[in-house]
Image: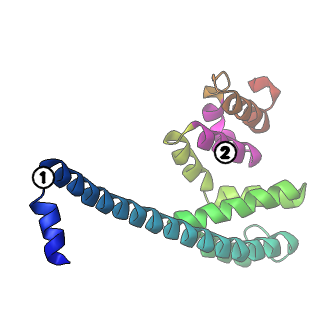
Amino acid sequence: MIQWLSTYLFNSYPPVFIASWIIVILTFIVAILLTIIMVSRIRKTLKIRKINKYLKEFEDVLTEFIFEEDVYEVGSDPYTGLLNQLRGVQRSSWKREAFVKVVMRLHRDFKGLPAKRLELLYKDLSLETYAQKKFRYSSWYEKAAVLAELGQMQIENSLPFAAEYIDHYNKILREEAQFAAIKMGGVQNM
């Protein structure tokens, strides 16, 4: 078999020789591409699992924070301890992404004092700085998501980011910028 293969690959006529090497090279390229695809899918699956684990963990912590107002009063030791515990969120982009998702979802679900407490926690953790960094170096759809986040959390110092895109040619980005500008500073900013 090996002798037949070596004869076929190395001692055949030029067209057969070239075709056989093209097939071998394409096979290796396909194998490499399949390996890259499999590795990227595995990494993406692991990321999703980690984020889902963090989502559950942060949801429990934030629900306790929202409903136990007297324990987590601003400036109290438990509130400071919670802030110190959640500062670790800022180090990992996966944890920060999961935390912001939970904060945004809870903020959408609650109105009044619980929503204000979530806004205060968001500001105390300085999560708007990460959103602003992400805003500068991202595509239009990520910018729209960041504008929605900053608008929902009513981060007034991010108004210049929204104002810059109020007249943008992309309809979705323009609408998010207009909505964020209204949430941040009122109708007079339009």
Q: Which residues are magenta?
A: 140-162
- Residue 150 location, x and y as percent? 68, 45
Q: Is residue 72 visible?
A: no
Residue placed furthest toward the left: 11
Q: Quadrant of the C terminus?
A: top right
Q: Nearer the viewer, residue 94 or 89?
A: 94
According to the picture, the residue beneath numbered tag 2 turns out to be 145
Circle 1 Cα neighbour tier, 10 Å, few/some/many (<14 / 14–19 / ≥20): few
Q: Residue at x 76, y 67 (%)?
A: 74
Q: Residue at x 83, y 54 (%)?
A: 108
**135 displayed left or right of 145:** left
Q: Main secondary structure of the magenta part?
A: helix
Q: Is residue 165 above or below residue 180?
A: above
Q: Quadrant of the N terminus?
A: bottom left
Circle 2 Cα neighbour tier, 10 Å, few/some/many (<14 / 14–19 / ≥20): some
Disc number at residue 13? 1
